[in-house]
Each structure stands twice: as structure tokens, then as C-alpha cells.
Image (spheres, rainbow, N blue to C red):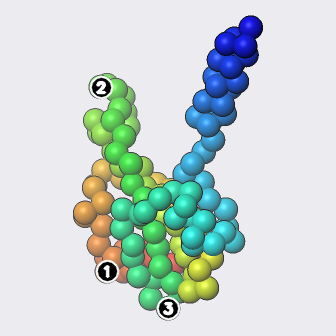
């Protein structure tokens, strides 16, 4: 009986952990909480006088024959941090290019470094 109860509790714990969205952070959270929740970013961009941008990237492989962005794509999560160390906004997108191809000067020219 004890083993059944223990297995049920462990199984419920794993289900609750798997269903949590670990890529979401709330506006107003501190920089340290973002780093604790999401870990170290793949890249940090300077947002001029507004603070910095943490870039998180995950490579996603799709099934052959689907109409996603090719056979694989990158899921980006941009977290905008103010000079005061608070999250001002976040942005998520899918792209075909790897994180090494992100150019902060090009992004600034396109107006993508500002908080949205």
C-alpha cells in the first residue's frame, strides 16, 4: 500500500513539473529571478540606455513533411531587462537562423531592440 501511494505521489509530481511553462517570466520580476528560472542566456545584447536583452534559444526539429520553418527551426525567447534589473517585456519568435547569426547592430536598425 505504501509503495502504491509513493508511486502515485512521485508520478503526480512529475506531471506537475512537466506541465509548467518554464520559458515564461512575468513583467516586473528581478534579473536574478529570471536567471534562476531560465538559467544563463545563450547571448546577452546591450539595449543602449534601456538596459540589456537576454536571448534564450532552443533548436526544434519538426517531422518531415510539415510546413514549419524547414526541417528544424530555432525558438527564441527575448527577455528585456531595465537598468534597474527588472523585466520590462518578453518576446518569443521562431526563426531559421542560429543564435550565432544574431547581430545586435542589424536588430537595432530594424527597431527590434526596443521594449515592446
Q: Secondary structure at mark 3?
A: helix
Please identify, in this view, whether the residue under mark 2 or under mark 3 is nearer the observer.
3
Label 2 – label 3 distance at C-alpha: 44 Å
Q: Is residue 110 visible?
A: no
User: How many residues crowd around disc 1 within 10 Å: few (fewer than 14), some, or many (20 or more)?
Assistant: few
Q: Secondary structure at mark 1?
A: helix
Q: Is residue 105 left or right of residue 75?
A: left
Q: Which residue is mark 1?
A: 105
Label 3 – label 1 distance at C-alpha: 15 Å
The image quadrant that residue 104 belongs to is bottom left
- Residue depicted at x 54% and y 51%: 23
The image quadrant that residue 105 belongs to is bottom left
Label 1 – label 2 distance at C-alpha: 35 Å
Q: Secondary structure at mark 2?
A: loop
Q: Which residue is mark 3?
A: 49
Q: Are marks 3 and 1 in contact (CB under 8 Å)?
A: no
- Residue depicted at x 69% and y 11%: 4
Residue closest to the eye, 43 or 97: 43
Give the image location of residue 38, x and y in percent. Answer: 51, 57
Quarter containing the C terminus: bottom right
Q: Is residue 47 visible?
A: yes
Image height check: is 2 above or below 90? above
Q: Residue furthest top?
A: 1
Q: Residue furthest bottom?
A: 49
Q: Which mark is residue 57?
A: none
Q: Is residue 59 left or right of residue 52?
A: left
Give the image location of residue 2, x and y in percent. Answer: 72, 13
Q: Which residue is mark 2?
A: 64
Among the two numbered marks 3 and 1 on one chain, the one whose residue lies closer to the N terminus: 3
Q: Residue furthest left?
A: 101
Give the image location of residue 77, x and y in percent. Answer: 48, 58
Amino acid at each position: 500500500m505504501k509503495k502504491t501511494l509513493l508511486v502515485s505521489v512521485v508520478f503526480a509530481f512529475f506531471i506537475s513539473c512537466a506541465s509548467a511553462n518554464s520559458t515564461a517570466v512575468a513583467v516586473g520580476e528581478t534579473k536574478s529571478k529570471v536567471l534562476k528560472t531560465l538559467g544563463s542566456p545563450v547571448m546577452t545584447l546591450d539595449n543602449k540606455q534601456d538596459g540589456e536583452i537576454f536571448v534564450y534559444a532552443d533548436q526544434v526539429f519538426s517531422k518531415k513533411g510539415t510546413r514549419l520553418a524547414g526541417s528544424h527551426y530555432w525558438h527564441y525567447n527575448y527577455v528585456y531587462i531595465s537598468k534597474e534589473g527588472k523585466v520590462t517585456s518578453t518576446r518569443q519568435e521562431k526563426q531559421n537562423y542560429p543564435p550565432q547569426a544574431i547581430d545586435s547592430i542589424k536588430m537595432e536598425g530594424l527597431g527590434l531592440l526596443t521594449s515592446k
